[in-house]
């Protein structure tokens, strides 16, 4: 998660490396954009406050650069700032946006630009909501809304290396990220979480297609591929960071999770200690913890001892959910 100190560093030292670059002449951009889009994005203009209905729309979807189509923001990070411009707390990924010091108009600000094509987007300020406290104040005319049916689910049940490996093999799962949630420390490190003092659990966040796999399917697999009856422990891993937990994003997810916990309890014949909590924020783990089993299956003995049996259990119990 980016914070103000990160923004200032990027503004002073240069933007993170983009996934690609798009370069065109001003004349070429002018033929592709409307006059207002060109004025704002290529001439660093500002649209009139409250001039777009985009400020008041919060349905699921993604926002891409109107010039080059690069993904910039997700609706899950959008909030009503009351300023008259669409506002977000984070970009869709760290290298989506570039930052530049802006001392124009008698103010000292940080300008935001599309990191792919250098389109002017707006500015970012340190007066947004917790936990990032950032407010990306973006011109609506610089954005194009793209409908998306993707959904996210966040949960933990022991070491995230194991959980990640299972859910990467389920049909309808678009992306799996390992990380931390449920605690009080912003941007915790793996070492800090392992100390047990951050309050965070090791979790994964899955992005999925609800038309292919449901939230209920995901939670059934979660409860069926770890031991939800052991408090703060999975095998040899012990501590609150290894607790069994499901974070829900709405009342419907909460009820589904509670019903499945009861169903699991009845099937096992003993109490299930899985927590069902409201989702707050997900902090991605360090790069070396992402896609761990796929990259380390032959190098770390833990993979063969702990993850291989878990994958075998998943395949046997949920054959209909296996990715083809």
Image: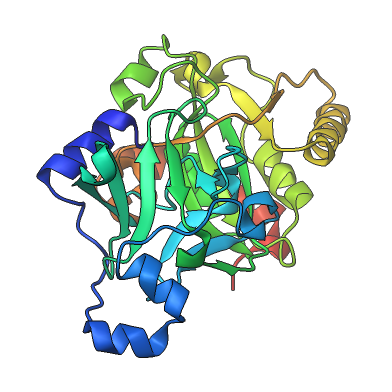
Q: Residue at x 85, y 34 (%)?
A: 255
The N terminus lies in quadrant = top left
Q: What residue occupies the far left of the structure in this picture?
A: 13
Q: How is the image coloured?
A: rainbow
Q: Is any part of residue 234 visible from this angle? A: no
Q: Residue at x 48, y 13 (%)?
A: 239
Q: What residue occupies the far front of the structure in this picture?
A: 106
Q: Nearest the camera: 222 or 50?
A: 50
Q: What residue occupies the far top of the structure in this picture?
A: 197
Q: Nearest the camera: 23 or 288?
A: 23
| x and y, in percent, of residue 161 in the image | 42, 40
**Which quadrant would residue 300 be assigned to in this image?**
top left
Is residue 163 left or right of 223 when viewed as pictured?
Answer: left
| x and y, in percent, of residue 235 in the image | 51, 24
Is residue 304 left or right of 141 when viewed as pictured?
Answer: left
Q: Nearest the camera: 121 or 287?
A: 121
* Image height of 186 relative to 172, above or below: above
Q: Is any part of residue 74 visible from this angle? A: yes
* Image height of 195 relative to 258, above or below: above
| x and y, in percent, of residue 88 in the image | 50, 44
The count of marks equals: 0
* Image height of 42 relative to 108, above or below: below
**Which quadrant would residue 236 be assigned to in this image?**
top left
The C terminus lies in quadrant = bottom right
| x and y, in percent, of residue 190 in the image | 33, 26
């Amino acid at each position: 998660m980016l914070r103000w100190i990160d923004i200032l560093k990027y503004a002073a030292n240069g933007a993170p490396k983009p996934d690609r670059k798009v370069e065109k002449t001003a004349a070429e951009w002018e033929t592709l954009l409307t006059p207002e889009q060109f004025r704002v994005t290529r001439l660093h203009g500002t649209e009139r406050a409250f001039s777009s209905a985009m400020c008041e729309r919060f349905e699921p979807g993604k926002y891409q650069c109107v010039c080059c189509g690069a993904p910039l923001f997700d609706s899950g990070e959008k909030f009503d700032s009351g300023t008259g411009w669409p506002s977000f707390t984070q970009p869709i990924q760290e290298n989506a946006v570039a930052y530049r010091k802006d001392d124009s108009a008698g103010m000292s600000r940080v300008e935001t630009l599309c990191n792919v094509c250098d389109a002017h987007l707006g500015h970012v300020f340190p007066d947004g909501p917790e936990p990032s406290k950032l407010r990306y104040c973006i011109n609506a005319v610089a954005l194009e809304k793209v409908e998306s049916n993707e959904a996210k689910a966040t949960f933990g049940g022991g070491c995230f290396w194991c959980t990640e490996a299972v859910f990467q093999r389920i049909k309808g799962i678009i992306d799996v990220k390992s990380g931390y949630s449920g605690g009080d420390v912003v941007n915790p490190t793996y070492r800090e979480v392992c100390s047990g003092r951050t309050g965070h659990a090791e979790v994964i966040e899955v992005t999925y297609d609800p038309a292919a796999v449901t939230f209920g399917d995901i939670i059934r697999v979660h409860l069926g591929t770890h031991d939800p009856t052991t408090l703060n422990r999975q095998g040899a891993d012990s501590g609150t960071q290894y607790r069994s937990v499901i974070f829900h994003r709405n009342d419907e997810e909460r009820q589904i999770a509670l019903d499945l916990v009861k169903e699991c309890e009845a099937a096992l014949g003993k109490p299930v200690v899985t927590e069902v909590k409201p989702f707050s924020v997900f902090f991605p783990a360090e790069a070396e913890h992402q896609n761990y089993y796929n990259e380390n299956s032959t190098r770390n003995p833990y993979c063969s001892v702990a993850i291989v049996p878990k994958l075998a259990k998943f395949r046997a119990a949920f054959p209909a959910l296996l990715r083809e």
